[in-house]
Image (cartoon, rainbow, N blue to C red):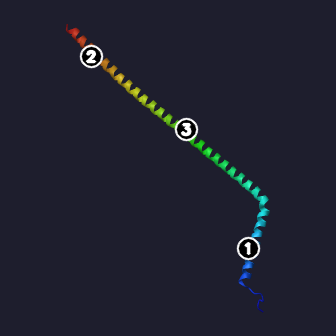
Amino acid sequence: MKNSRSNDLADRREAANKAKAALLEAHRAIKAAAEPNLKEKQAERLAIAAAREERKAERERLKREEKERIEAEAAARQAEAEALANAEAEAREKAEKDRIARVFEDEAARKAERDRRYANRKARQR
């Protein structure tokens, strides 16, 4: 048996409009039912976002403090190394000056001994 209903364009269009209206009404009903939960969910999302931002700020602060601590330690090691290098340079310089002073003293003592021998020789010749 054939479907006795006529399926004109106007009927199909009317059926499609009714279906769309029914879907829209169902959507509005679901949205209205979810409205009380929407505010709660939105507040919860805002709280989660704020907590996330707070944790992020804390991590950044800790990273910054760690970086500053590392830089301070590096600066302290650098200063210590420079002080040690300066101390070694001063010690080498002092040792060199002491060695030069000993050489001069030895040279002066040798000249004094030579002059004494020369004076003794001259005294014996007279």
Give the total of numbered labels.
Answer: 3
Report the amino acid beneath label 1: Lys
**Helix, strand or loop status at disc 1:** helix
Where in the figure is residue 80, as x and y percent of width and height?
50, 34
The mark that comes first in sequence, 1 or 2, is 1
Residue nearest the observer in this picture, 1 or 86: 1
Q: Which residue is mark 3?
A: 72
| Crowd class of label 1 (few under 14; some 14 to 19; many from 20; radius 10 Å) | few
Where in the figure is residue 33, as x and y percent of width and height?
79, 63
Instruction: Check contact, mark 3 vs mark 2: CB within 8 A.
Output: no
Q: Which residue is mark 1?
A: 20
Quick check: 39 above or below 65? below
Quick check: 41 above or below 22? above
The mark that comes first in sequence, 1 or 3, is 1
**Helix, strand or loop status at disc 2:** helix
Report the amino acid beneath label 2: Arg
> Mark 1 and mark 2: span between their CA atoms?
129 Å
> Mark 3 and mark 2: span between their CA atoms?
62 Å
Q: Which residue is mark 2?
A: 114
* Quadrant of the image containing the C terminus: top left
| Crowd class of label 2 (few under 14; some 14 to 19; many from 20; radius 10 Å) | few
Among all residues in the image, which is located at the extreme top? 126
Residue at the (48%, 35%) spot, across then down = 81
* Quadrant of the image containing the N terminus: bottom right
Q: Nearer the viewer, mark 1 or mark 3?
A: 1
Residue nearest the observer in this picture, 72 or 55: 55
Among all residues in the image, which is located at the extreme bottom? 1
Residue at the (45%, 31%) spot, across then down = 86
